[in-house]
């Protein structure tokens, strides 16, 4: 019986104690400073450096206009949505600007002061080059951010 204790205790710790990556269905969270949005990608079928081989841009849209944009050619992308920005609906777009590789991306949304993270992963393919893809909607009300 004591062997079950050694198996169940670590399992409960992992299930109840670790909360680094929540699913997108968690709805959202409160953060008094705002959100930091990171876009990183990898090339699963290539040995090329992902930043050299592919150029992605990350945009934050508000009222159907680009509110903020990350257009780094030499690094991964990063945006901020501060709690002091206007309330309303924001959208996150990824644009596959250039490259000739299929890729996997991770969009990480992190509370700047709460450090809570939500991970959204996806894929883009060679035929997606030149396209812009809306990957997330954020409903902001004060310090509350609802993600869908």
Image: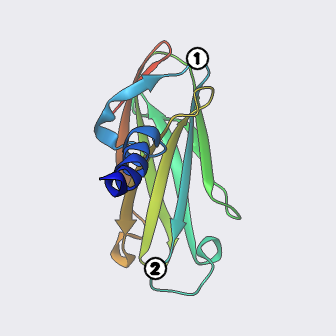
Q: Farthest front residue?
A: 1
* 63 shown above or below 18: above
Reading the image, the residue beneath label 2 is 44
Mark seen at residue 111: none
**Residue 91: quarter of image:** top left
Q: Nearer the viewer, residue 12 or 144?
A: 12
Q: Is residue 110 visible?
A: yes
Q: Pointer 1: residues within 10 angstroms few (<14), some, or many (20+)?
A: some
Q: Nearer the viewer, residue 98 or 28?
A: 28
Q: Pointer 2: residues within 10 angstroms few (<14), some, or many (20+)?
A: few
**Residue 32: quarter of image:** top right
Q: Which residue is located at x 39 percent, y 42 percent?
A: 22
Q: Farthest right residue?
A: 74
* 104 shown above or below 12: below
Q: Nearer the viewer, residue 82 or 14?
A: 14
Reading the image, the residue beneath label 1 is 32
């Amino acid at each position: 019986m004591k062997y079950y204790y050694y198996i169940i205790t670590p399992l409960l710790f992992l299930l109840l104690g670790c909360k680094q990556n929540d699913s997108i269905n968690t709805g959202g969270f409160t953060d008094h400073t705002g959100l930091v949005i990171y876009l990183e990608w990898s090339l699963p079928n290539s040995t090329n450096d992902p930043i050299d081989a592919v150029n992605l841009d990350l945009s934050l849209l508000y009222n159907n206009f680009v509110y903020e944009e990350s257009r780094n050619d030499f690094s991964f992308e990063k945006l901020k949505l501060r709690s002091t920005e206007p309330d309303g609906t924001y959208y996150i777009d990824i644009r596959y600007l250039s490259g000739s590789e299929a890729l996997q991306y991770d969009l990480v949304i992190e509370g700047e002061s709460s450090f809570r993270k939500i991970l959204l992963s996806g894929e883009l393919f060679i035929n997606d080059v030149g396209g812009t893809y809306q990957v997330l909607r954020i409903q902001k009300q004060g310090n509350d951010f609802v993600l869908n």
